[in-house]
Image (cartoon, rainbow, N blue to C red):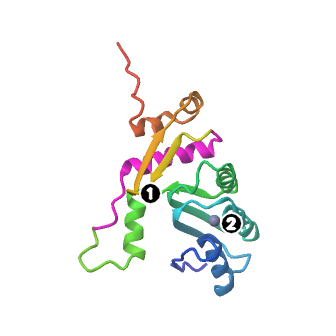
Amino acid sequence: MSRKIWRSSGKNTTNHVEVNFIEKLTSERRFHSSVSCSVTWFLSWSPCWECSQAIREFLSQHPGVTLVIYVARLFWHTDQQNRQGLRDLVNSGVTIQIMRASEYYHCWRNFVNYPPGEEAHWPRYPPLWMMLYALELHCIILSLPPCLKISRRWQNHLTFFRLHLQNCHYQTIPPHILLATGLIQPPVTWR
Ligand SMILES: [Zn+2]
């Protein structure tokens, strides 16, 4: 069994980057259906529902491939089709996670042509954003309604995050995830 690593980066063209990657992998790399390997993606946005379908089709044709996807942000996450697309991916065995500092650092080191001496200057991203997106991804996977509302003011490039937690969220989301956001307090036990 060979342990070769292939690194590649891609952008959206007329197709989304996910579809471009699959096409590149299957055409240029002569990727046979019997190949067994693990693929890790770092995406700026989570896959849309159409890409989710294309990914599932690719995986069904290549059962030896495992896919882990790290995303920086959730793409139109209140859209029901996009939500279902992500759930379908998870149900097909794909791991989807919101990028944390360590993944940003990995991308910076491996994919960014940074100037010498700038090794430590990976792009800073507010930890709260990561936490809120991670919370919303939980809602999606657990088939809960969206709890994260995002609005943008294009004039001054401001992004507003608003959380709207309902009873179903409190009852279903694991407490440690909610606690991590600082939105709920741990229960106090009196002795
Ligand atoms: Zn897409």
| Magenta part of the chain | 121-144
Q: Using the rendered view, name the quadrant where residue 94 is placed.
A: bottom right
Position of residue 20 relative to residue 81, above or below, is: below
The disc labelled 1 sits on which kind of residue? Trp
Mark earlier in primary sequence (2, 1): 2
Lateral position of residue 4 relative to residue 158, left or right: right
Foreground of the two, 67 or 117? 117
Looking at the image, is mark 2 or mark 1 nearer the viewer? 1
The amino acid beneath tag 2 is: Ile
Residue tagged by mark 1? 154
Is 139 in the magenta?
Answer: yes
| Residue 127 drawn at (x, y percent) | 37, 50
Residue 128 coordinates in the image, percent (x, y): 39, 47
Horizontal side of 101 relative to 27 (left or right) equals left
Residue 138 position, x and y percent, is 56, 44
Residue 103 is inside the magenta segment: no
Q: Residue 164 versus residue 97: which sits nearer the camera?
A: 164
Q: Is residue 175 above or below residue 86?
A: above
Q: Which residue is mark 2?
A: 55
